Amino acid sequence: CLHPQLPAIVLSHGLGGSRHLYSSLSLELASHGFVVAAVEHRDGSACATFYAEPPADEGSRGDGPEASRVSWLPLQRAALDDVPLRNGQAEQRAAECLEAAETLCLLTRSGSAEVSNRMPDSDCGSDADARMLDQFKGRIDEKRIHLMGHSFGGASALTALSTAPTGLFRTCTLMDCWMLPVGEQRYSGFAPLPVLFLNNDSYHWETNARRLETVMAGIADPELKTCVSIRGTNHLAQMDAGFFLWPRLARRIGLCGEKPPVEATILTADICKAFIAKHEGTALTELQQRLLSGEDASCFPGLSWHPDTGRPG
C-alpha cells in the first residue's frame, strides 16, 4: 500500500543554541507524525556548528569521506543589542529556513538525487546518507510545511515570512520571539497565513512586547493570529536545558520554570499541534480548543511582560 504523505516543520533555534538543544520538542512533534527539519544556523549565532568544505582536489569524488573536510564555526561574540549585526543575522537565518523548506520539497520529489552539499558519512560508507535521504521520497506533503522558531529563531521565522514564496509555509509559530533582530520592514507585508504567538510567562519585557504587539496588530484577520502563554515556564521551556540537572536544582539556577520540563515540552507540542490542526481543517477536541483560547488551566490568552530594566534588546 502507499505510504501517507507527512506534514513537515522547519525549526529555527535561538541565540547560542543548536539543533540538538531542541531534541525533546522535535521528538515529541515527530512522534505525532511530523518530519522535523531542525536548522543549525551558520550566521555565527549557534553555539558551534560545522560544515563540509569543497574538496581541495577537484578530481576527487564529491560524496566520499575523503572528498571534503569539516570546518567549525564557533559562536560569534557580540553585544546583544548590536542592531546591524542582529538584523543581518536574522536575514541570513531566514534564508537558511527557506533553503531548509525547499530542500524538504526536493527530498519528496526526488530523494537525494537533487540535494547537494550533503555531509559525507565516513563511518557508514559514502552512500549511507543518500540511502537515508531517499526514505523521504514521496513522503513529505509540500502543502503542509510549517515554520517554527524560538527566541532568535522566532525573529528568523518572522523575517522569513517576508521573503518566502506564497504558499511555501502553511503556518508559522513564533515561540518567545526576540524582536530586536527583526527589521521594522519585516513587521508586516508578508503573505497572509496563520501565525501562532506562543509565549512563556516570564520572558517578555515592555519594549519587546510592544514590538510583538505591532506585528499582531498588522495581521488584520483575527482568524489568522493566535496569542497564548504557558503558565509556570521561563524562556528555556522549549529547549532541553531543564533536563540537564535534577529538577529542583534546574529550577533554582533558572534552567526551567515551575512547570516540570517534561510537562512544558508536551504542552508546547500540544498547543502547536492544535494550532496546525485548526488551520489544516481538522476538527479540534475540547482540550485543543481550550489550549488555543488560553482557557485551559495550563495557559492564558495574550502575553505578559515586565517593565524595561535596561536589558539589551
Image (cartoon, rainbow, N blue to C red):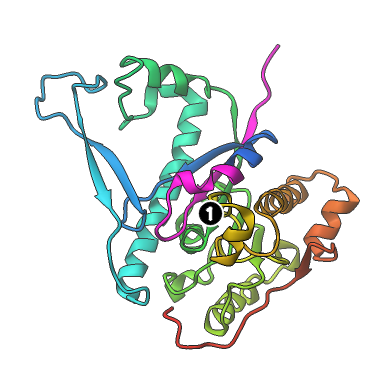
294 left or right of 67?
right
Which residue was labeled with disc 1? 241
Quadrant of the snapshot with the N terminus: top right
Q: What is the x, y in percent for residue 46?
A: 36, 54
Residue 19 shown in magenta: yes
Q: Quadrant of residue 222?
A: bottom right
User: In percent of the image, x 28 and y 39: which residue is there?
Assistant: 51
Q: Is residue 285 above or below residue 106?
A: below
Q: What is the x, y in percent for residue 272?
A: 69, 51
User: In percent of the image, x 64 and y 31: which residue is there?
Assistant: 6
Q: Quadrant of residue 251?
A: bottom right
18 left or right of 161?
left
Stretch of the chain drawn in magenta: 1-25
Q: What is the x, y in percent for residue 53?
A: 20, 36
Quadrant of the snapshot with the C terminus: bottom left
Check disc 1 and report its element: helix, strand or loop: helix
Q: What is the x, y in percent for residue 200?
A: 64, 66
Task: Tell which residue pokes out farthest to the top in this image.
Answer: 1
Q: Is residue 220 above or below residue 281?
A: below
Kindly tell me whether residue 281 is visible in this rendering.
Answer: yes
Residue 72 shown in magenta: no
Judge by depth and name the residue closer to the eye, 258 or 25: 258
Q: Quadrant of residue 230?
A: bottom right
Judge by depth and name the residue closer to the eye, 39 or 16: 16
Judge by depth and name the residue closer to the eye, 167 or 226: 226
Q: Looking at the picture, which amino acid does disc 1 mark? A: Ala
User: Crowding near pointer 1: few (<14 within 10 Å), some, many (20+)?
Assistant: some
